[in-house]
Image: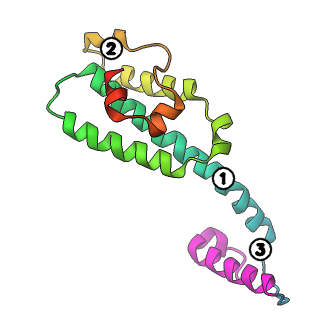
């Protein structure tokens, strides 16, 4: 196995490493496991999932804030669809151990600040709450109509 396969073709590398690990699990003695990268990748899997959930929550909050800033906007249906997709993705990937590692106030502040940077001509921008008006549970599983009414 070329030493740089990990850097050149992560897909092929991961398939080869998975095959070697399966063979080891079946009791076969094999060489060629790239232990340092396998360990690194396993460690990164959870962080990657956590970051994905944070990203979906960030997008969920942005969609909710759009409803606040532009009530009755013609794009409302589009925002609703996006809101449902982002919420479903966050909920599907969320696992209980993430609860203590998601700083909702930070995710909310980033979302709010992003909209404030992009939108300067809407007088309602000043009415965006300073703290997140939704709980993590509401964002992941709450009734969309209740979220939009907040």
User: Which of the 4 image quarters holds residue 123?
Assistant: top left
Judging by the rendered image, the residue that carries numbered circle 3 is 34
Residue at figure coordinates x 40%, y 36% from the top left = 60
Vertical placement of residue 132 versus 100, above or below: above
Q: Secondary structure at mark 3?
A: loop
Q: Earlier in the sequence, mark 2 or mark 3?
A: 3
Instruction: Say whether marks 1 and 3 touch (CB < 8 Å).
Output: no
Vertical placement of residue 98 versus 6, above or below: above
Judging by the rendered image, the residue that carries numbered circle 1 is 46
User: Which of the 4 image quarters holds residue 75?
Assistant: top left
Q: Earlier in the sequence, mark 1 or mark 3?
A: 3
Judging by the rendered image, the residue that carries numbered circle 2 is 125
Judging depth in this view, the residue of 118 and 76 nearest the camera is 76
Residue at figure coordinates x 36%, y 47% from the top left = 85
Q: Secondary structure at mark 1?
A: helix
The part of the chain drawn in magenta is: 1-26
Q: Position of residue 35 (x, y in %)?
A: 80, 70
Task: Bin the neighbour count of mark 2 within 10 Å (Cα to Cα): few under 14, some 14-19, many 20 and up.
Answer: some
Instruction: Say whether marks 1 and 2 touch (CB < 8 Å).
Output: no
């Amino acid at each position: 196995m070329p030493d740089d396969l990990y850097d050149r073709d992560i897909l092929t590398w991961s398939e080869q490493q998975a095959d070697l690990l399966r063979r080891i699990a079946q009791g076969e003695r094999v060489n060629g496991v790239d232990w340092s990268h396998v360990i690194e990748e396993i460690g990164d899997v959870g962080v990657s999932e956590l970051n994905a959930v944070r990203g979906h929550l960030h997008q969920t909050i942005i969609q909710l804030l759009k409803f606040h800033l532009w009530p009755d906007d013609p794009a409302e249906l589009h925002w609703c669809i996006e809101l449902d997709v982002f919420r479903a993705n966050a909920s599907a990937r969320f696992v209980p151990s993430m609860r203590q590692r998601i700083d909702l106030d930070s995710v909310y502040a980033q979302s709010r600040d992003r909209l404030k940077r992009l939108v300067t001509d809407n007088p309602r921008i000043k009415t965006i709450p300073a703290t997140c008006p939704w709980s993590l549970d509401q964002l992941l599983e709450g009734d969309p109509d209740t979220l939009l009414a907040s």
